[in-house]
Image (cartoon, coloured by chain):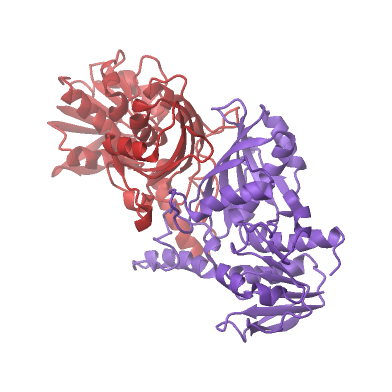
Chain colours: A red, B purple
Amino acid sequence: MKVAIVGASGAVGQEFLRVLDEQNFPIDELLLFGSKRSAGRSYKFRGQDITVKELCHNDDFKGVDIAFTSAGASTSKEFASTITKHGAIMIDNSSAFRMDEDVPLVVPEVNGDDAFNTPRNIIANPNCTTIQMVVALKPINDINPIKRVRVSTYQAASGAGAAAMDELVNQYAELQRGDKPTIEKFAYQLAYNVIPHVDVFMDNGYTKEEMKMYNETKKIMHAPDLDVSATCVRVPVMRAHSEAIWVELERPMTVAEARTAFENGEGLVVIDDPANKKYPMPLDIADKDPVYVGRIRQDLTHPCGLSFWVVGDQIKKGAALNAVQIAQYMIKHGKKF
Amino acid sequence: MKVAIVGASGAVGQEFLRVLDEQNFPIDELLLFGSKRSAGRSYKFRGQDITVKELCHNDDFKGVDIAFTSAGASTSKEFASTITKHGAIMIDNSSAFRMDEDVPLVVPEVNGDDAFNTPRNIIANPNCTTIQMVVALKPINDINPIKRVRVSTYQAASGAGAAAMDELVNQYAELQRGDKPTIEKFAYQLAYNVIPHVDVFMDNGYTKEEMKMYNETKKIMHAPDLDVSATCVRVPVMRAHSEAIWVELERPMTVAEARTAFENGEGLVVIDDPANKKYPMPLDIADKDPVYVGRIRQDLTHPCGLSFWVVGDQIKKGAALNAVQIAQYMIKHGKKF
């Protein structure tokens, strides 16, 4: 199997190198691509040094079976035909194609089979906040359809890239030295702050990040009537996102039923033992593969409502791991590369 | 007017000294009380040094008109009769009496007149998270009754006291030195983390903090059918709490109507100009008096729903300032001390 990573020097690109190795992904040859700036850098994969090539409009992707792309939406759009024209499946981490009708948007635990319907050889990886939410919604929705979702997020710095993570750490160091904190990657100082603003604002007052949760959830879950109202907030955490979720179901559901459903849910781990102070927290969940759920309760405002708390690593399940799992799902279910 | 502060050395006690001065509160004599440990310390108020006396069961409160108490629920319970027996009005910041039927629970902008119904000479100051929420709910509820509230909080370290604020700052310093962070005031490391756990857990899976928002909101707003489902989360912020709120109303309400209602709301300031990246953030709102609201949007899941974002300083409006405003309200409305 010949695999390519596009955007190899970024936070997600680097995670692809680790995840492909951790998952024992079957690779005969690995190619790394990046911008002009990162071309020439070299990264180790399974003991071999691989040099990043500049992404160009040429025939570099001839013979590539799968290309994992994470270099921003404009790069994905510009290079999609270069990447796919010789038959490679492009699993794209950007928002470029997510809502395109002829591009499946896939979370394997939820809609893995959609990955086989790829007229353009492109599969889109959903936004990080959506991925971890739908993994938790799926087992509930399977037994009692969800009508409404309200969700507020506690999003880590990693969602804004490796430089943003550095910026957060540096801000604490700067503040401790009595210096003015450097602000480049976020709209405002993130240290000792929370910022209710992720991605750009839309005309309806929601951010693009919040509308991703609205639109992507419907598409992934094949549920056009399932509405999501999200408030997305950046918090000074390094790499795992947390979400406070309320769901309104068709019928009442007890906490015990919900817990059983979550426990049987694919890709989910329940940590919910308040008496012993056990609940998922981003500091613990950073670098872990599954999505974690806890604080499972009745919604005190609605007889058919539940409330729970979901935490997942943004770079792993929220990005690189989900993309690799899409490829694994396809291989497991008969796709020959 | 003779005024006492009980718990003068704590974060809220210290804020009482600042707020009483800032508000030009009419004081002829100020007495400070504290635990055995803090007795003997001295604090400046309007140029005078005042020494903290140990709180004892004696006649120290003879002649006191108003006692602002913030020394924990058990101290409030133990000393309530000592403080009030000679006629002093006790405005208590603890949770000791909040739900007692013969003790009013007051946010002046919402139910100021309740402060005049004090058979036990006790008035309770609500929990910080409730205060800032009801200030925002009031103007909406006045024109379109609220049926349901879902709220997730982003609570600052200050809610756990001055030592907790120090602990957070120290954790960043310790981590930077490569040391293990000291954890005493919170259940887990708060630096680079969020903890979905404030106060103790109850049998229904909610925390006491979350149930305070449920119970206190009903009482303050005289709305027994207004239900609140809260998820309370500690975040690494110093002193202002943020809240992501969804309300379901009796009838639809446009964002424009809601904005006008908020703008006319008492004690509220609207910061809601997404195009110019203007929204309330805890770093900006620390030490400010009003409650701030922004991110006003339709709830995309419900025709009668709204979503918005509320930020308030936990030590000011969430504690000391609200208590002082209760006294100011009483004076303004004819109470003679």
- In this orientation, does residue A10 appear? no
Residue ranking furthest to the bottom = B40
Which of the 4 quarters of the picture holds residue A88? top left
| Residue in front for this viewpoint, A193 or B80 | B80
- In this orientation, does residue A167 appear? yes
Q: Position of residue B243 (x, y in %)?
A: 57, 46
Please determine whether, in this image, residue B240 is positioned above or below residue B178. above
Residue ranking furthest to the top = A119
Please determine whether, in this image, residue A270 is positioned above or below residue B17. above
Which of the 4 quarters of the picture holds residue A261? top left
Please determine whether, in this image, residue B103 is positioned above or below residue B182. above
Which of the 4 quarters of the picture holds residue A65? top left
Drawn side of residue B124 relative to residue A288, left or right: right
Which residue: 36% across, 49% down? A280
Please determine whether, in this image, residue A52 is positioned above or below residue B331. above
Drawn side of residue B25 relative to residue B228, left or right: right
Drawn side of residue A80 relative to residue B23, left or right: left
| Residue in front for this viewpoint, B132 or A324 | B132
Rendered-image quadrant of the C terminus of chain A: top left
Drawn side of residue B151 relative to residue A104, left or right: right
Q: Position of residue A243 (x, y in %)?
A: 44, 42
Rendered-image quadrant of the N terminus of chain A: top left
Which residue: 62% across, 69% down? B70
Q: Position of residue A62 (x, y in %)?
A: 20, 20
Which residue: 31% across, 22% down? A123
Q: How many marks?
A: 0
Q: Position of residue A92 (x, y in %)?
A: 33, 27
